[in-house]
Amino acid sequence: MESAVKVERVFKNFQSGKTQIEALKDISFEVGRGELFGLIGPDGAGKTTLFRILTTLMIANKGNAWVDDLEVVNDYKEIRKRVGYMPGRFSLYQDLTVEENLSFFATLFGTTLEENYELVKDIYVQIEPFKKRRAGALSGGMKQKLALSCALIHRPSVLFLDEPTTGVDAVSRQEFWELLRKLQLQGITIIVSTPYMDEASLCDRVALMQDGRIMDIDTPKGITQKFSKPLWAVGAADMYSLMNDLRSDERVDTCYPFGQYHHITFAEVNQEIQGIEKSLVDKGHTNLSIQKIEPTIEDCFMELMNQ
């Protein structure tokens, strides 16, 4: 696999008063050309710091990285011409209109909207009716589409998107991922970070990050297939009391709330479910539901955190 991005043993520390904060701890991975790669993890996992290093906005303390076969420190000027970067916080000019923002960013890269219109057409047609509106007055979903258009205006070879769907509605999130798939078909390598575990399944491969480390890298299916024990979903009328009773049961290994159910694993792989069910009924639980389920990326993430 030819690499569009390569990271080798990257460390990054920050000084906070007298305390050293380790933001990245020995990060290594590769992203193939044309791949849609996800960095999945909660706030504070190190995703944004990693993006800033790869887009030449920050220098690592140790290690090295390459983007488009260019080294991020020595070749930073050339890298900036080739990558698109959409930061997590909306950072376009709020007082400029949609049209003015696009024109400004196109001018920075010596191009025009017309020159690369085919690349941004699917996105731009959705914001074109608001082209005279100031960027600061757009909805969250429209701001997101404008920012993506500006990041694409110079036809980058690698696109970095830092938590692009945070704070937007479910429909806009779905539309955004459909746009990413269309961009991928045009040969653009896309690296996207997100705290939403459900978005991991939309990537070709993902890296699960926590506390500055990569816990696992694989396809979404590959990660879920590594889940070590049978998983059960348990529900009842009183979910809080149910959680306390499950966590206090020595037969239960892990128990985490997941929407309308608690996802549990047992200390013994061949645990008889009837015994658990009887003890919960004896404790007064009603509307009891216990069913075996397939693990999600979030289940796998929780398991990796506890290893």
Image (cartoon, helix red, strand yellow):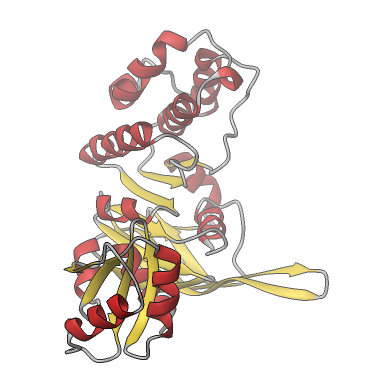
Residue 167 visible in the displayed image: yes
* Quadrant that contains the C terminus: bottom left
* Total numbered labels: 0
Residue 211 placement, left or right of 193 = right
In the image, what residue occupies the spot 33% across and 70% down?
285
- State the residue in front, 45 or 181: 45
Residue 8 placement, left or right of 77 = left
Residue 228 visible in the displayed image: no
In the image, what residue occupies the spot 41% across and 17% down?
127
- State the residue in front, 8 or 262: 262
Image location (x, y in percent) of residue 5: 37, 58
The part of the image, by quadrant, that contains residue 259 is bottom left
Residue 246 placement, left or right of 106 = left
* Quadrant that contains the N terminus: bottom left
- State the residue in front, 175 or 116: 175
In the image, what residue occupies the spot 35% across and 85% down?
253
Image location (x, y in percent) of residue 183: 28, 36
The part of the image, by quadrant, that contains residue 7 is bottom left
In the image, what residue occupies the spot 62% across and 56% down?
58
Image location (x, y in percent) of residue 271: 20, 88
Q: Determine whether 174 is above or below 253 in the image.
A: above
- State the residue in front, 199 or 248: 248
Point out the residue furthest to the right here: 17
